[in-house]
Structures are given as structure tokens and as C-alpha cells.
Image (cartoon, grey):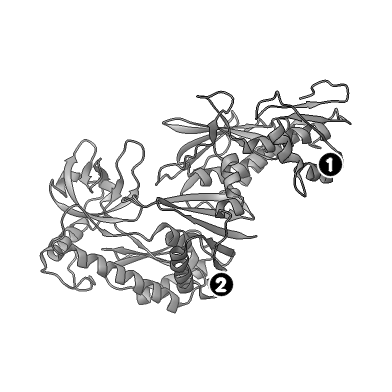
Amino acid sequence: MNRELIVRSSSQAVDFALLKDGQLTELHKEENSNDFSVGDIFLAKIRKPVTGLNAAFVNVGYEKDAFLHYHDLGPQLSSMLKFIKQVSSGKLKDYSLKNFPFDTDIDKNGVITDVIKANQSLLVQIVKEPISTKGPRISSELSIAGRYLVMVPFSDRVSVSQKIASKEEKDRLKRLVKSIKPKGFGVIIRTVAEGQKVAELDKDLENLLNKWTAMCKKLYRAQTPSKVFVELNRASSILRDVFNDSYTGIHVDDATLFNEIKEYVAEIAPDKEDIVKHYNTNVPIFEKFGIERQIKTSFGRTATMSKGAYLIIEHTEALHVIDVNSGNRSNKAKNQEDTALEVNLLAASEIARQLRLRDMGGIIVVDFIDMIKAQHRKKLFEHLRDEMKDDRAKHKILPPSKFGLIQITRQRVRPEMNIKTTEEDPNNIGKEVEAPIVLIDKITVDLERLLKGPAKDNSITLNIHPFIAAFITKGFPSLRTKWFLEHKRWIKIQPRDAYTYLEYRFINKDGKTIY
């Protein structure tokens, strides 16, 4: 399996596309103006505790106040407040916490007005970026993520990722980390730490401690609100979270970014440094790797799948609804039940990809095609669960309901990726139509249905606008040649001047329209 990261840079933003065997699975955008990214830490000021919500509104410098719930304060809040006060005033210059006297934990079921007050300074971390009309969601239980470890100040707990299955490996990692962990810091051992030696873990922990020290130095006489810790740029954070030995290529079209990524890969995986390549040709990088085409066909209300099946994806304020349709799908299944299972399994794989690709969060309700057999419903549920194993966002999938619906909850920490795929209709100014690039896919699907369907047509002519006709017939191998090689049938192309750009008809030997 090939995994590639394609990085496109512009003056306004940097786009990151993750490809799995050439198929687009994740798309991220880092805008240069984004000052409130997940993981950033601010020295902020409490604006107003609200007893009714058991939460506080906090000024982090965004137009809307950030929201801080009591349960996100962290048990060692009192110790942190004391630490901030002493460091900000210059009384404390040892940031290691090994000699810092900790206070008792706050009551986990307490009231917010008992522990924090208006105008108080507090260190907070962005856990959810501003979405729609809401300000950022924050936490004062800080964590600084590294390659193998996550360091949690004002804690003493060591925990291991649930995704590490082996109990012996969990015990080994816990034992190693406890032997190198500094006092006053908790550690979460990440999944990628599996099999790593103590030297690698110690190096990662030392790097995290250096980041903590650098952040603490900024607290002295710092103004509120101010950013005191910046999460890695999106390129490095993506590499940190998803990079593994299965990656076969990282392609970057910007020289500066290429050097940054190459240095980072050399640091975390020296044997993989050669897979980072600077893309420097006249063809845009997203065009070269077929990403632009996939974006056009993957976003929007309709997401097509193979053999004519498709998804309808609708968004509301409260939830997302996905409807599975078999469309004009033709297959060798003996009955309707087998057809439903085949389409549903295909849809489950595409839905798992769409959730990651669009970064859809909240509640997702999927209406699969009804299946009578219980074993088929179980197979579908297990397949969807397996397909979503690679999803880094926290999620939960419920078994199919008696109505055939599957409900998914998926963590949302950033605004959903929303890309406009419609374009202005050249035949009707002011209206929009599906992107013309999708037209070829639709023609191919319809042609396959006519050639492989129950009522096969022996002689087919495609009537289409002259521009599209030229696109289908010119070059080698042309699209028509590819159709011939696949179906062993030659399709006659008839340009029609009277047709609009996106209009087409399939005609049989009797001159009748068959589609």
C-alpha cells in the first residue's frame, strides 16, 4: 500500500493532501491568518464565570470569548494558578516543577466560582477551533504533544494508548517512561511509541521539556491575552501524527517548506529522509497527482462510487445525513439482498473516506439500503468499524437500528472542510451547474450500464457538444480508445452544434435515444 503526502503552497495558505494508493483520503488547509489552531496555548484572562453553565467565558483575543467548562479546568488548577502568578512576577525561575509545592486537587464536582474569578490570568489551550458563530473551546489541562509522548504538566500519571494491544508492551513502555519521567509531569504514551527504545523516548521527552521551558520564559510580564506556545505548523503536526514506515513519498512544491519538512523527517525518521522530494515542474502539483479531479468529484451534495452507486450527503445545523443509493448499478448478484449488501459495503468504505476527507463532525446518520438478513447487517457494521480504524478523530459507531440506520458520532475540533464544486452555467448566466470535469465520469458510468446491462445495445452513438467530443477522441490513448480496450466495443462519437456544453445523448442503431 502506497501512502503519499502532497503539499501545495501559496501566499494565502498551504494545502495538504494524503493519498492512499492514489486515492485522496484527507485534505487539510493551513491558512496563514489562522491564529487559533488546536494545540496553541494562551495566557488568557477570565472575563466572566457563569454559575448556571458551570463554565467561564475567557478572553483569548478572538472576537468571541472562548468557552471553558469546569470539567476542562484540570484537577491541579490551584497549583497552576500559583505557578503562573510566581513565574509572571519573576519570583520563580525554576520551571522544572521538581521542587514546586503542589496544592490539593480541586473537587471534580465543584462549582466554577469557587476556583476562578473574573480578571484572573490563566493558561489555556485551544481544543476546538472557532466554528460557525462560536468562539474557541479551551481547556486549562495542558498537554504538549511529541512524536512518541504527550507531556501533561502538573500531573504525575503515566498512561498508554488504548490502540497498543499487547499487555507486555504496555507494561514495558510504562516502566521505561516512569524511569525517565521528571517529577511534576504526567506522560501519555502514543501508539507510535510501540517497539521504541528508551533512548528515543528520552530524546522526545527532553524535546518536550525544552518546549515547556521556552513557553514559561514568555510568561514573565506577559500581557493578557497573548499566545505563549504555538503548536507545530500543520505540515509537521500531520507528519508527527500520521507518518509511519508505510509512507512512500512526500512531495512539496515550495523550496522553503521542502527544507523544513526534510529536516523534520530527518529528525524523526532518518532512514525515510529520501522520500521527501521537491516538486518543481510547470504542471501544478495537485493536477499532476490527480487531486484536483478527485476534489471536484468527492465534494458536493453527491459523491459517486463505482458501477453507478452514489451517496447523497446533506448537512443541517444539528447533524449530517447520508443516504446510500444503488443508482443504475449492474452486477452479477443473484438477488436483491446480495445487491444491497454489495452496495452497502462499498458505501461504508466511501463514507469512512468522506468523513475524514471533509472532516465532518458531530452526529452523522447513515441510511443504508435495507437488508433482511441479520448476518448481513452485522457484516456491514463490522466492515464500517474496520474502515474507520485509521480515523484519528475520536468516534463511536452504533449498530444498525431496526429502521436500518447507523449512527456515528465523530469529534469535531476544526471547521468542516467545505469546497465549492459547482461552477457558473455557461448556458444560463446566474445559475450554477455541476463541475464539467464530473461530466466524463457520468458518461463513463452511463456507458458501462448500457454495455453491461440486461438489455445490451450492440450499436451505440454518443451525441455531444463538439468541445467535449474533441476531448473524448483526441490524443493517445484517447478516452474512446480506453473504452474500446475495456469493453471491446467501438463507440461512435457524433458532435452536435446545437447541444449545450454539458448535454449528451446515447442513440441506438434505430436513431432512438436510449439515455
**100 w.r.t. 504: above or below:** below
Q: Quadrant of the N terminus?
A: bottom right
Residue type for callout 1: His
Q: Is residue 6 left or right of residue 100?
A: right
- As drawn, the label of residue 274 is 2
| Residue toward you, 14 or 331 | 14
Residue drawn at point x = 81 percent, y = 37 percent:
332
Q: Is residue 107 left or right of residue 280?
A: left
Among the 4 quarters of the image, the one containing residue 504: top right
- Provide the secondary structure element on which disc 1 rests: helix
Q: Position of residue 270 (x, y in %)?
A: 51, 75
**45 w.r.t. 251: above or below:** above
Residue at label 1? 487
- Provide the secondary structure element on which disc 2 rests: helix
Q: Position of residue 292 (x, y in %)?
A: 57, 46
Q: Position of residue 39 (x, y in %)?
A: 34, 56
Q: Position of residue 233 (x, y in %)?
A: 39, 59
Residue 103 appears in the rendering: no
